[in-house]
Amino acid sequence: MHTTENPRITNLCHDPNHDYLTLVCSCCGQNLVVPKYCGNRFCPVCNNRRRKAVRAKLDYILSHIIVYKRTYLSHLVLTMASQDDPYQMTRQLVRAFRKLRQRKFWKKFMLGGAFVIEVTRSDSGYHVHMHVILHNYYCPQRLILKHWRKIVGRGGVFIKKIPKSAAAAYLTKYLAKPGEGVSSQIASDSMKNLRLFNVFGTFHHYVILMKKTPFPCPHCDKIAWQFIPQAVIYDVYT
């Protein structure tokens, strides 16, 4: 019998202000308490499951990435000029990054990657940052900046090599909480209908290969979950 922790199902310390659901194993009666999604994508209770699931996905992808000669793993940060509407800014950022990936230089140097978006606020307004983990050949920062500014006008670029062992942590930490100066609800609303985590290039191939594995009851190893009070069978997947 195995008792590995599922990234989406954990017995959490209850937040009295949050709603929970209880699952029961119809084979042995073991209970699991899981948070009910509240609609706020940066809620610390709900987001705990998402962050662990994304970390598991990234770990799987990175375990299959071969950093061969003359290639690296890099952390790329893309920024835009500050504005007053974070909702529009996040969409502009996603569209701009899509255009950047369509450029010839990008296809020459970049193999694949994954990204998340961070929204922060200062006295000058809202700022959006795209944090990207790249598997790439060497590409000068000034070349990326040149093409990025042709797309967005004023904007910034930062890129550095990172060790493979640290790549997943670079992205998942931005899923754990909203950016500085921004409430969790504003951050959540600004990214409505956008994926908090996305992949492209060769990383997309490994996401397709990643199989969803059923989560067995840690007590009897069976997969026969029911909601309480509803008598509905609920198969839980990672």
Image (cartoon, rainbow, N blue to C red):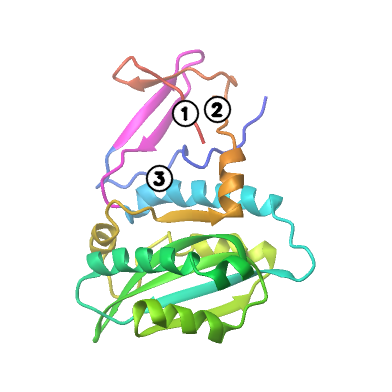
Q: Is residue 92 above or below residue 24?
A: below
The kind of residue tagged 2 is Pro
| Image point (35%, 64%), residue name | 95
Q: What residue sits right under mark 3 in the picture?
A: 13
**Percent of width and height locating residue 44:** 36, 54
Numbered range of the magenta stretch: 20-40
State the mark number for residue 236: 1
State the mark number for residue 214: 2
The kind of residue tagged 3 is Cys
Could you give the CA–CA distance between mark 2 and mark 1, rounded to whole angstroms? 6 Å
Nearest the camera: 102 or 225?
Answer: 102
The local secondary structure at tag 3 comes to loop
Q: Is residue 33 left or right of residue 219?
A: left
Residues at badges 1 and 3 in contact (C-beta under 8 Å)?
A: no
**Percent of width and height locating residue 43:** 32, 54
**Foreground tag (2 vs 3):** 2
Q: Is residue 199 above or below residue 123?
A: above
**Percent of width and height locating residue 181:** 29, 75
Residues at badges 2 and 3 in contact (C-beta under 8 Å)?
A: no
The local secondary structure at tag 1 comes to loop
